[in-house]
Image (cartoon, rainbow, N blue to C red):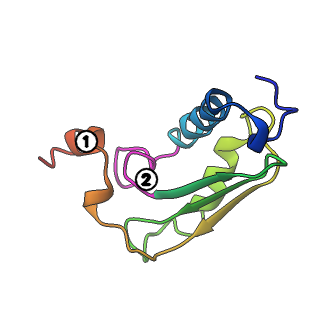
């Protein structure tokens, strides 16, 4: 993929491929208390790629008092380092709206026997 083209000028397919690589990287990050990655748990609220390839991610935790609250943004940033062509990565923690199990993917619900 030619990353010299700003996202606003990429084809939908090119932007989708870049987004897929970002999501694949995020899916390597797991909540240490739950054997499911943070993307499938529904902890990622938004992924925004700017024209300069800076990435902003809004995420939450399963609970505000989660013991890894301070570490999780750094874990996400670290996971994105191998994604070629990205600029600065900013991970914002939010608890609005609060996370609830309805945000989990079908895959996560199956993994955790929540059907």
Q: Look at the image and say whether residue 38 sits in the magenta stretch.
A: yes
Compared to residue 76, the image places residue 79 above or below, namely above
Question: What is the spatial separation of the Cα atoms under label 1 and label 2, in whole angstroms?
Answer: 20 Å
Q: Nearer the viewer, residue 75 or 17?
A: 17
Residue 81 drawn at (x, y percent): 74, 41
Question: First in sequence: mark 1 or mark 2?
Answer: 2
Q: Is residue 61 left or right of residue 28?
A: left
Residue on which disc 1 sits? 106
Residue 32 is tagged as 2
- Based on the picture, tell me whether residue 15 belongs to the magenta stretch: no
Q: Nearer the viewer, mark 1 or mark 2?
A: 1
Q: Give the side of residue 73 with respect to residue 110, left or right.
A: right
Circle 1 sits in a helix, a strand or a loop, which is it? helix
Front residue of this view, candidates 80 and 1: 1
Which structural element holds mark 2?
loop
**Residue occupying the point 15% across, 44% down:** 113
Q: How many marks?
A: 2
Q: Nearer the viewer, residue 15 or 32?
A: 15
Q: Residues within 10 Å of mark 2 (few under 14, many from 20)?
A: few
Left or right of 101: which side holds 97? right
Q: Would you say the magenta stretch is mainly helix, strand or loop?
A: loop
Which image quadrant for residue 19? top right
Would residue 79 be found to the left or right of residue 96 on screen?
right
């Amino acid at each position: 993929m030619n990353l010299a083209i700003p996202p606003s000028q990429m084809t939908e397919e090119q932007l989708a491929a870049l987004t897929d690589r970002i999501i694949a990287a995020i899916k390597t990050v797991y909540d240490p208390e739950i054997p499911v990655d943070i993307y499938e748990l529904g902890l990622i609220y938004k992924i925004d790629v700017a024209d300069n390839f800076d990435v902003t991610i809004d995420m939450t935790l399963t609970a505000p008092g989660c013991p890894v609250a301070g570490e999780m943004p750094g874990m996400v940033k670290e996971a994105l380092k191998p994604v070629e062509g990205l600029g600065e990565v900013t991970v914002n923690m939010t608890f609005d709206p609060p996370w609830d199990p309805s945000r989990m993917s079908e895959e996560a619900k199956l993994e955790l026997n929540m059907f």
